[in-house]
Image (cartoon, coloured by chain):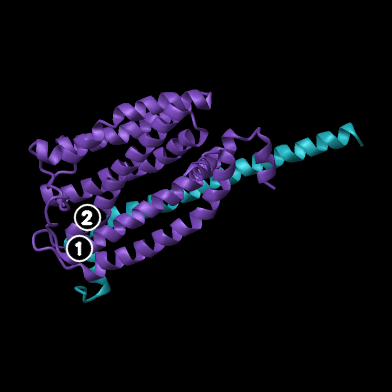
Chain colours: A purple, B cyan
Amino acid sequence: MRQSIVHWFKFASPQSFYPLAGRMIPWFWAAAAIFGISGLWISFFVAPTDAQQGEGYRIIFVHVPASWMSMFIYLVMAFWAGLGLALNTRVSGMMAQALAPTGALMAALSLWTGALWGKPMWGAWWVWDARLTSELILFFLYLGFMALQAAIDDPRRADKAGAILALVGVVNIPIIYFSVKWWNTLHQGSTINLTKAPSMAQTMLWGMMLMALAFWMYSIAVALMRVRAIILERERHTEWVKHAVE
Amino acid sequence: MQWNSVGEFFAMGGYGLYVWGSFGACALLMVAEPLLARRRLSEVRKILARERLADELDLQQKNP
């Protein structure tokens, strides 16, 4: 028991996390490619035409994964930021910083694909309803987190300030998630639910799940790439970095 | 498969602009982001290599 704890703490140091991340990245890229190719295949060639929305519904295969990841990455980012605040571990703050741009990208894609889906189906690119507005706030939370961190020179202080912002912003996640239940909205309810059977064709569901996995693996791979750069940037004056880069 | 021709596939039943606008934006950003991340890493590595070289030259000057 004790040994396994020591084992895990070992990877909490930038020095041992840097090569570990480097070894993991290709595997996550491979997984992202496999899930992505099979997901796209189902999205376009297996999933049937929707009875109501015709071929336009196929936007779901990127819209839902991007939206899920935008919320999930925020939770992971806030978790790392909070851990860094509580335990003062160096890698935690770097992880939070590495995740923010990817989360912002997912939120942007969620809004963009949502607009392109809303226009033909609702007749509007944008409406100020609860789901869309709270997702827009999520996008701004990511941008705010990044701007705040960039504005503070001392990385440890930047981590602390960012962590507080990230933790306060967590309250927005359940608001996004439940917004379609709590308020009247144009946005359709969730197609996948923990309590009842999914309300869509099996093949559509499979396509969506595979695409979600692809987005997930992509996010991990790109965040690990970024965290490696951040580790070197922040630790550049230490001995191990001088030896790590030949 | 529900497509009879390549043209039909790209038309997406009249929703081509919206469907391809969505998938295209995803593809564009999800190609650009890893490239930017890779450039950031190689940039900091270049700086580190330069600093290392500077250190070595320093040492050589001190004890020729």
Tell me if mark 2 has few (under 14), some (14-19) or many (20+) residues whose alpha carbon lies within 10 angstroms of its own.
many
Examine the image and state in which quarter residue A148 appears: top left
| Residue A169 place in picture, x, y as percent | 30, 29
Residue A225: tell me if it is visible: yes
Residues at badges 2 and 1 in contact (C-beta under 8 Å)?
Answer: yes
Percent across and percent down for residue A46 are 23, 70
Residue shown at the point (41%, 60%) measured from the top left: A31
Q: Please, is residue A151 above or below residue A95 in the view?
A: above
User: Mark number for residue A204?
Assistant: 1
* Amino acid at the residue labelled 2: Ile
Q: Amino acid at mark 1?
A: Met
Work out whether residue B15 can be spotted: no
Q: Callout 1: residue from which chain? A: A
Element type where label 1 sits in the image: helix
Gap between marks 2 and 1 measured at Cα? 9 Å
Q: Which residue is mark 2?
A: A60
Q: Earlier in the sequence, mark 2 or mark 1?
A: 2
Q: Residue at x 26, y 32 (%)?
A: A137
- Residue at 46% over, 29% down: A87
Q: Considering depth in this image, is B29 or A166 the residue closer to the camera?
A: A166
Tag 2 subunit: A
